[in-house]
Amino acid sequence: MKMFRGIFFLFLIVSPFGLKAQAGNVHSQNSVASCNADFTTIDSMGYIFFVNNSTLGSAGVYFWDFGDGFTSTQYNPSHIYDSTGTFLVCLTAYDSLQNFCDSTCHYVTVTNLLGVHENKNRISELTLAPNPSDANANFSFYLSQPSDATFSVFDVSGRMVREISSAHFSTGKQNLQINTGDFSPGVYFIKSNLNGEVTTTKMIVSHQE
């Protein structure tokens, strides 16, 4: 009887630790297998858009280091650099419980500065409303001189989704209507091209249920 009690008492001590170790190993394996931090960039004359391609998606928590002393915790941030050069940009991803997930770094080379070209731009005052958009959005801009221009929508992978307009525009404020009703929810970029002068505007589509 004493021997049976001794075995039972030993089982109570050892068993919880064995279960806890097994649960910890499973959680660690799942976290590593399902988590990958990654991003791409879009450069619009010194205005850099960072596109988050991490596997956790919007459920993750992110920390960006732009390599010039500035940081961000946004999902898809944008950043303007004050000087040209090559910067090491690092993205660190955490899960919803603030556990470390993964990190990655990419070099970003900035050759144009937004402020240097500001006075030379033929297109300015680019605005999109509403943004996020549900069904329709108004894209407005100002032209300093008559220009042939093309406006297209691209997704985060760089694929053109739709050409909005390709026409000759007069001087002054212009407006274009974008029907986003059949767009999948997510982040898009409106790219305008005026004889090689390219600008990019971020557009978010979020359909209301």
Image (tube, helix red, strand yellow):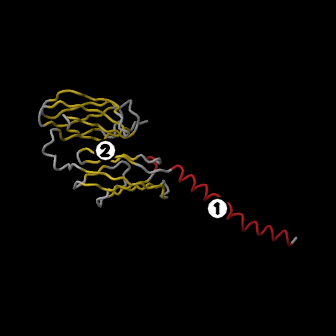
Q: Is residue 46 above or below residue 196?
A: below
Name which residue type carries label 2.
Answer: Ile
Please name whichever residue, 110 or 133, is drawn nearer the observer in this view of the structure. 110
Count residues near mark 1 (Cα–Cα under 10 Å), then give few for <14, some for 14-19, many for 20+: few
Measured as percent of width and height from the top left, residue 21 is found at 64, 61
Apparent side of residue 26 relative to residue 73 in the rendered image (left or right): right
Please name whichever residue, 50 or 111, is drawn nearer the observer in this view of the structure. 111
Q: Which residue is mark 2?
A: 42
> Nearer the N terminus, badge 2 or badge 1?
1
Q: Secondary structure at mark 1?
A: helix
Name which residue type carries label 1.
Answer: Ala
Measured as percent of width and height from the top left, residue 78 is found at 30, 49
Please name whichever residue, 67 or 180, is drawn nearer the observer in this view of the structure. 67
- Residue at the (32%, 30%) spot, across then down: 162
State the mark number for residue 156: none
The quadrant holding residue 147 is: top left
Apparent side of residue 35 relative to residue 42 in the rendered image (left or right): right
Measured as percent of width and height from the top left, residue 105 is found at 38, 54
- Quadrant for the N terminus in the image: bottom right
Q: Are marks 2 and 1 in contact (CB under 8 Å)?
A: no
- Residue placed farthest to the bottom in the image? 2
- Residue placed farthest to the right in the image? 1
Q: CA distance from mark 2 to mark 1?
A: 44 Å
- Residue at the (20%, 27%) spot, across then down: 167
- Quadrant for the C terminus in the image: top left
Please name whichever residue, 62 or 1, is drawn nearer the observer in this view of the structure. 62
Q: Which residue is mark 1?
A: 21
Measured as percent of width and height from the top left, residue 20 is found at 64, 61
- Residue at the (61%, 58%) spot, across then down: 25
